[in-house]
Image (cartoon, rainbow, N blue to C red):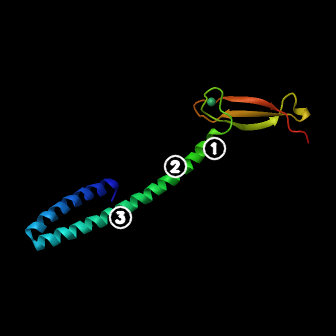
Amino acid sequence: MDIMGALAVASQSIKLAKDLRELERELDSAGYKAKMAELYGNLADIKIALSDAKEALHEKDGEIKKLTAEIIALKSGETCPLCQSGNLKVTSIKPHPIFGVMGQKEHTLTCQNGECGHRETRLVIPAER
Ligand SMILES: [Zn+2]
């Protein structure tokens, strides 16, 4: 049972409780017992539905935490100067065409936003050994 189903059963149960109050006045014992059994059944269904909903909320909380961590990881690093939404990622490293002989590298950075695709190269001087 989902939350909407549980709410429907809950309002049905409230009506049952009202009916029971009426029956109690009239002392209709058979009708009273039948309504009482129905009420207990409904309350048990609601309890199960609420416990399922609690479980589902717990799972969603975990999912939200995971996605938040992913978003933070994706947003860290350098943002593309063109689209301002993608991250720049080093996609190739090769010796620099001029300064490569001196051990300097050329890094190619590509924007991770598929719609942008901006690419730029940078001269990278390796740290002194
Ligand atoms: Zn971009």
Which residue shows up at 56% across the image and 46% down it? 68
Where is 51 relative to 81, above or below? below
Residue at the spot of label 3: 48
**Quadrant that contains the C terminus:** top right
Residue at 44 percent across and 55 percent down: it is: 57
Residue 112 occupies quadrant: top right
Q: Nearer the viewer, residue 38 or 20?
A: 20
What kind of residue is marked 1?
Answer: Ala
Q: Which residue is mark 2?
A: 64
3 or 2: tag closer to the N-terminus: 3
Q: Which amino acid is tagged 2?
A: Ile
Q: Which residue is mark 1?
A: 73
Q: Earlier in the sequence, mark 3 or mark 1?
A: 3
The tag on residue 95 is none
- Compute the Cα span from label 3 to label 2: 24 Å
Q: Is residue 32 left or right of residue 88?
A: left
Residue lying at the far front of the rendered structure: 25
Q: Measure the alpha-carbon separation of dots 3 and 1.
A: 38 Å
Provide residue 102's location: percent of width, then percent of height.
91, 33
Residue at image point 13% right, 68% down: 24
Q: Dot 1, how many residues are within 10 Å of its Cα: few (below 14), some (14-19), or many (20+)?
A: few
Along the viewing direction, whichever of 34 and 119 lies nearer the viewer: 34
